[in-house]
Image (tube, coloured by chain):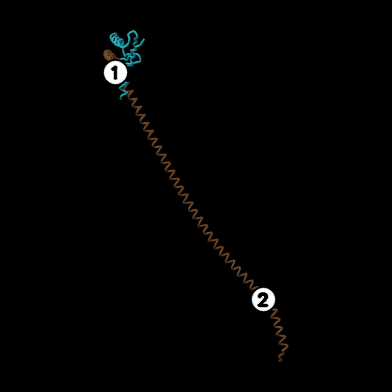
Chain colours: A brown, B cyan
Amino acid sequence: MDIQLAQIIFQAINFGLVLFVLTRFIYKPVLKLLEDRKKKVAEAAKSSNEILQEKENLEKMKADILSKANQNAQKIENDTKNEAKKSAKTLMEKSKEELSLKEAKFTEELAKLKKDKLKSMEKELKEAAVVIAEKVLQESIDAKKHQKLIDQQIDEIIESL
Amino acid sequence: MLQVNVTSAIALNDQQKKKLELALCKKYSKDELVFEYQIKEELIAGLHVSVAGKLYDASLKARLNQLANKI
């Protein structure tokens, strides 16, 4: 088998041409496609990471907001409880004060009532004593004693003139 | 004219009236006095005399009332 130079050159040119065509129209576009895909994957990964980060941030924010909301709710609850306690205490003190005043007034009125009743009873007793004394005297004084008493009283009146 | 009201539990006898009138006539002018006698059993005993706006109350009723007021 003879090796022909022309044949070799032809084959070399042919190989070169095929290499050129392959490189130009297949290898480079595929490489570019792979590069683009790699970039897209990287971008997607980056986006995904960003989204994950954002999600994490949002969850953290949510947790913060929830925590603050809980704190606020707790504070409001405590404030409300304190306010209610304060109001109840004030109301209790006011009621106590009013009760004390009413009690004092009632005691005073009772004492006055007692005093008035005693006075009234005293008056009735005096009147009854006078009526009894009048009856006793009317029954025990006869005409002679009447005249003697009148004589004495005339003397008293004359002395006082 | 001065009116003298003499109120007693029983009627005064003449002697008592005379004694009282004489004493009052000495105190006041005789011509001015007019005596009027009344009987009120509610006085119990004794008498009271009112003259020239003055009251001389010596009745037992008055004394009992004074006593009741002092108690």
Residue drawn at point x = 35 percent, y = 14 percent: B52
Q: Nearer the viewer, residue A51 or B21?
A: B21
Mark 1: give few (<14), some (14-19) or many (20+) Cα within 10 Å: some
Residue drawn at point x = 67 percent, y = 76 percent: A28
In the rendered view, tell whether residue B36 sits above or below residue A125. above
Q: Secondary structure at mark 1?
A: helix
State the quadrant of the C terminus of chain A.
top left
For label 1, the residue is A137
Q: Which mark is residue B6?
A: none
Which x, y percent locates residue B57? 32, 16
Residue A150 placement: quadrant: top left
Q: Amino acid at mark 1?
A: Leu
User: Which chain letter matches label 2?
Assistant: A
Residue drawn at point x = 29 percent, y = 18 percent: A137
For label 2, the residue is A28
Which badge, 1 or 2, comes first in the chain's sequence? 2
Q: Amino acid at mark 2?
A: Lys
